[in-house]
Image (tube, rainbow, N blue to C red):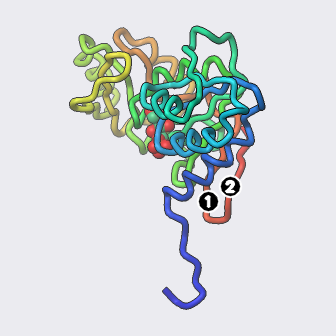
Amino acid sequence: MTAGATKSPTQAELKRLVGEAAIAYVEAGSIVGVGTGSTVNCFIDALGGIRERVAAAVSSSEASTARLQALGIRVLAASEVDRLGVYIDGADEIDHAGCMIKGGGGALTREKIVADLADRFVCIADESKLVDRLGRFPLPVEVIPMALAQVSRRFAARGATPRLREGFVSDNGGAIIDVHGLVIDDPAALESEIDQWAGVVCCGIFARHRASVCLLGTPGGVRTLQF
Ligand code: 5RP
C-alpha cells in the first residue's frame, strides 16, 4: 500500500456499520422484530447496548433468540404480539425495488412470519448485496421432506438446478433446496406461485414482504435506500 492510502473496509466492517445504524430505527419502549444472520448479529450486539430501551424482541430463529437472551433481551413468541413497528433483517440479495432473496442461513420461513407482523422492514446489508436483478444467489426454498423430489422436478422443468442443502434441518424441521439458475423476471408473481406448490413451506423471495428501507454499508458510509 502506498503511504497515505486508506484501506477499504472489509465486508465484516460494513456489516457492523449497518448493524449499528439500524439502532436508529428502534423506538424506545417498543418490541422489535429481529432477523437472522451475521449482519443481524451485529445489530443484536448493538441492541444489547440499549437493552433498557427495548421492551422485548420477536426473533426469527433459535440462533437469534439465544443471542438476544444472552444479552438480557426478553424474547416473545410471534403469537404473543399483534403488530411490530419494525422488523430488522439482512438479505442475500436486494434489488432497486426492495425485493429480496433471503434464506442463506435457512431461517426464511420464520423471517417471513415475523416480517408479516411488521409495519416496516428495515434491511441491513453490505453493498455487495445490491443487485439489478434477483437470481444470481441460489434461491432457498423450505420444503416438507416428503415433497423434495416433486418440488425439485418443478424447478428442473423451468430449467433451474435445485440442490438439497445436505445435512441441514430448519428450526421448523424442514429441508432446504437451493435453486440455481432461476430466472426471476417478476419477483412477486414467482413468489406467489412457488409458495403455492404442494410441499413448499416458504420460498426465499421476499417481494410481498419487501424492504421499506435498506441501510447499505459502503466504503463511504451508510447509504439509505427508501422504497
Ligand atoms: C438468513 C437470511 C440472512 O438474512 C441472509 O442470509 C444474509 O445473511 P448475512 O447477514 O449473514 O450475510 O436470510 O436466513
Q: Secondary structure at mark 1?
A: strand
Q: Amino acid at mark 2?
A: Val
Residue 197 appears in the rendering: yes
Distance between the alpha carbons at the discs numbered 1 and 2: 6 Å
Are the two marked residues, 1 and 2, in contact with CB atoms closer than 8 angstroms? yes
Image point 64% across, 23% down: which residue?
56
Which residue is identified by label 1? 218
Q: Secondary structure at mark 2?
A: strand
Q: Amino acid at mark 1?
A: Thr
Front residue of this view, candidates 85 and 158 = 85
Front residue of this view, candidates 194 and 61 = 61
At which x and y percent is residue 223? 69, 54
Image point 58% across, 23% down: which residue?
74
Image point 62% across, 59% down: which residue?
218
| Crowding at mark 2 (Cα within 10 Å: few <14, some 14-19, many 20+) | some
Q: Is residue 14 above or below residue 155?
A: below
At which x and y percent is residue 160? 32, 33
At which x and y percent is residue 44? 56, 39
Which residue is identified by label 2? 222
Front residue of this view, candidates 79 and 166 = 79
Residue reaching furthest to the right: 28
**Image quarter hosting the C terminus:** top right
Residue 184 appears in the rendering: no
Left or right: 44 as drawn, with respect to 144? right
Locate residue 158: give its quadrant. top left
